[in-house]
Amino acid sequence: MSEIKESELPGIGKKFTLELDSGDKLVVVIHSSGEREVFKFTRDNDEPASVTTLADEEARQIGAILSGTYFQPVVEEEQKLAMKNATMEWIKIMPDSMLVNKKIEDLDIRRRTGVSITTIIRGETVMPNPNPGESIKPQDTLIVVGNNEQVKKFISTFEIKHRLENDR
């Protein structure tokens, strides 16, 4: 793992420099205002090849993506083993669904069908590992996981009509 060098920029904020395995460098300047600037320097070049400026909230979102909050890649062999007997299904909740405005805990989904709701996507909000007290709303997308039979039982038990094929 590469060492991150940190230095004070008086009156500006802090600078963090990371030398990449490729020999390139990333320099992140965090201003006292919260704004971030990201500079990429290619090997043996004193001029940045690219510069990106991010507001505080944008930087936090990018940080969450980079840290794996939204997607955690799995080594292919581990993925094959893990998914051998597991099915992941994206379910769009329509306004007339029997799940609408009901709490996950009250629906007793895992006991009744064997599947787990791993994520709720509500507009631009992604809720991984939703709280059992969370209510399901119209237009939510649920990501459920179970074996093939459990997923089929969930779909039939809760009369699911809208599975998403193209949004994966």
Image (tube, helix red, strand yellow):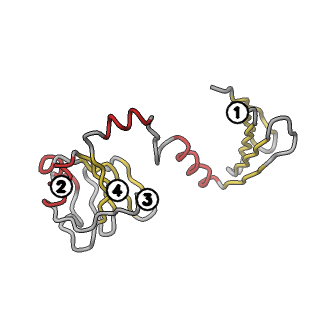
Question: At x 22% / y 74%, what residue is drawn?
Answer: 96
Which disc, if any, is residue 120? 4
Q: CA distance from mark 3 to mark 4?
A: 8 Å
Quadrant in the rendering for residue 95: bottom left
Q: Is residue 9 above or below residue 116?
A: above
Element class at badge 4? strand
Q: Nearer the viewer, residue 14 or 166?
A: 166
* Amino acid type, mark 3: Thr
Q: Where is residue 99? Give x, y as percent.
A: 21, 64
Mark nearer the N terminus (2 vs 3): 3
Q: Can you tell which of label 3 and label 1 is closer to the viewer?
A: 1
Element class at badge 3? strand
Specify few, some or many for label 4: CA neighbours under 10 Å numbering under 14, 14-19, or 20 or more.
many
Disc 4 to disc 2: CB gap under 8 Å: no
Q: CA distance from mark 4 to mark 2?
A: 19 Å
Disc 2 to disc 3: CB gap under 8 Å: no
Quarter of the image where the C terminus is located:
bottom left
Disc 3 to disc 4: CB gap under 8 Å: no
* Amino acid type, mark 4: Ile
Disc 4 to disc 1: CB gap under 8 Å: no
Q: Which residue is mark 2?
A: 152
Q: CA distance from mark 3 to mark 1?
A: 32 Å
Q: Which residue is mark 1?
A: 20
Q: Which residue is mark 3?
A: 125
